[in-house]
Image (cartoon, rainbow, N blue to C red):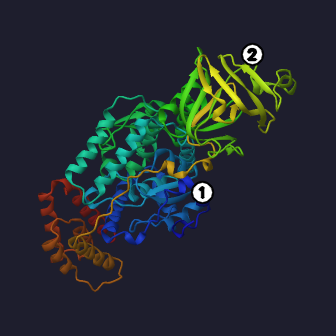
Amino acid sequence: MNQYIEMNPLLDKLPPHLQQYIKPQNYDDYTSINQAVWRYVMRKSVSYLSTVAHDSYLDGLEKTGISIDAIPSMYGMNRILKEIGWAAVAVDGFIPPNAFMEFQAYKVLVIASDIRQLEHIAYTPAPDIIHEAAGHAPIIANPDYAEYLRRFGEIGAKAILSAHDNDMYEAVRKLSIVKEAPGSTVAEIEAAEASVNELQSKKVELSEMAMIRNLHWWTVEYGLIGNVDDPKIYGAGLLSSIGESKWCMTDKVKKIPYSVDAAYQEFDITQPQPQLYVTPDFSYLMQVLEEFATTMALRKGGFRGLRKLINSKKIGTIELSTGLQVSGVFTEMITNEDNEVVFFRTEGPTALSNREKELIGHGVTMHPHGFSSPLGKLKGINLAIEDMSPRDLKAYNFYDGERIAFEYESGIKVEGLNVTGIRNIHGKLILIQFTDCTVIYKDKVLFKPEYGTFDLALGKEIVSAYAGAADYNSFDSMHFKSETLTVKVEKSKEDKDLEALYTKVRNYRTQKDTSVSLETIFETLTSKHSKDWLLLLELYELVDKSSLLEEKISQRLQNIQQERPDIAQLIIDGMDLVVTSYSENL
């Protein structure tokens, strides 16, 4: 492991396909403006949230070592998080939903290390360190909620996506990047928003991942807890949004008792939420999650589960009644009149596993072009091969080194030379290898001798179907990573000059350098950076009260409120914080 994520043994257990998303936090890249944004949001949030957030929030801030005055480092967070059994890593913005869920299953918080621009201080659709570290991290100090989050990740990582989900993920990721990139034009932002809106407006059947994402949104991100008439906040999206944490407490936002119905309620990431769900307590979240999980292909299997995998066009896994697991991109199935799967096919690299471990000699190098097999019982026998005793196998001529021909109840016929078989830990056959083999269904040839060795998967039925590989080591991790990267823009001289002023004020406040003239900084700010308001608030906090400089700063802040009504409330809230803090210290 790299130095930037040391100090937590949980991270050593992460598989390669998750490690690929981890990046250095590069703490020194945070500017003094970034630090001021963090400080403003945290001071404002803690002041307000102390009255409306769940009790676990403030307790969690202390337990997780998150400071109000400085952006947290991954190094420091991991040192403290390991005491409560969790870890944290920095990533580049949104990562694919299955990967995000899997990190949670490993009890690892995924933290987008970038921070919102000053222009988006109240809310940003992009994941940032304020949302992740100050929103998610504190609540996991509550054991019930932490276990819910882990279990959610465990189940959510298996949820099957649709092709629409893939498109939606890429569109939302692009929008979040464009909106936070300083150099983005209005046209670029509008185009990215239009793409998201177009996909959101499409009437498509909700996939498992879409429904699990909805449950995640209405709990982990935007959840309320307690009584519907007087709820408290625990969702990270609300805890990290100055605007929405206030908005959600008004009568304009409908409060609904939480239930599995929330899985069918979609949301718009670009708008404030018109309704929110209230859970009576954290343990009830687990109850609803388990209720939903019983509907998933993970537990249902069957033709519906396989159909979901085919529609996803992504690597997925089916598990047969023998325990044999087939992982790959599924492209075809044949069903009988009872909608039972009697044949399936994958295309491209495929791996066979048992109990989440790849079978020796049956990885993607053995099956680079796909895998196929019939399923079910044999015709006239009413018995599946997997259920045959050694005596049955002998009676029906299943001998190594002998040719055999047999027919399934579905009408699929297999004829070839029986080479050998593989058994599971319970002694049941799970795979039989044939050479010179032909597989026929009606007038269609499903496998020919010239295709090579035919491996017959044994199983009456598909008992489980889920996203991803049974053994994560089977596939190249690059199958899972987005090509859209966050944008780093070259700073202008004006930007650098403004950052230098913020640094001087920060150094003054931390007593690193008290020789600077606050009045000179104010004059420079007013003449050369007249649109900036946050540094004015920092100066307002530091100057002597009732001084002439305080009057000037106060007047300038009032003028900006008139000039820019869109940020007036942010300034008012900031000035109130200063006045309240001053009064408390008298």
Instruction: Check disc 2 and give the amino acid type.
Output: Asn
Could you tell me which residue is drawn at 50 percent across and 55 percent down? 109
Camera sees residue 266: yes
358 to 38, vertically: above or below: above
Crowd rating for badge 2 (residues with CA inside 10 Å; few <14, some 14–19, many 20+): few
Could you tell me which residue is drawn at 54 percent across and 48 percent down? 102
Left/right placement of residue 101 relative to residue 340 reads left
Judging from the image, what secondary structure is the residue with disc 2 in? loop
How many numbered marks, from 0 up? 2
Q: Position of residue 395 (x, y in %)?
A: 85, 21
Q: Which residue is mark 2?
A: 382
Instruction: Check disc 1 and give the amino acid type.
Output: Gly
Left/right placement of residue 188 relative to residue 439 reads left
Q: Nearer the viewer, residue 328 or 162?
A: 328
Q: Using the rendered view, name the quadrant where residue 507 is placed.
A: bottom left
Numbered mark located on residue 85 in the image: 1
Could you tell me which residue is drawn at 35 percent across and 62 percent down? 43
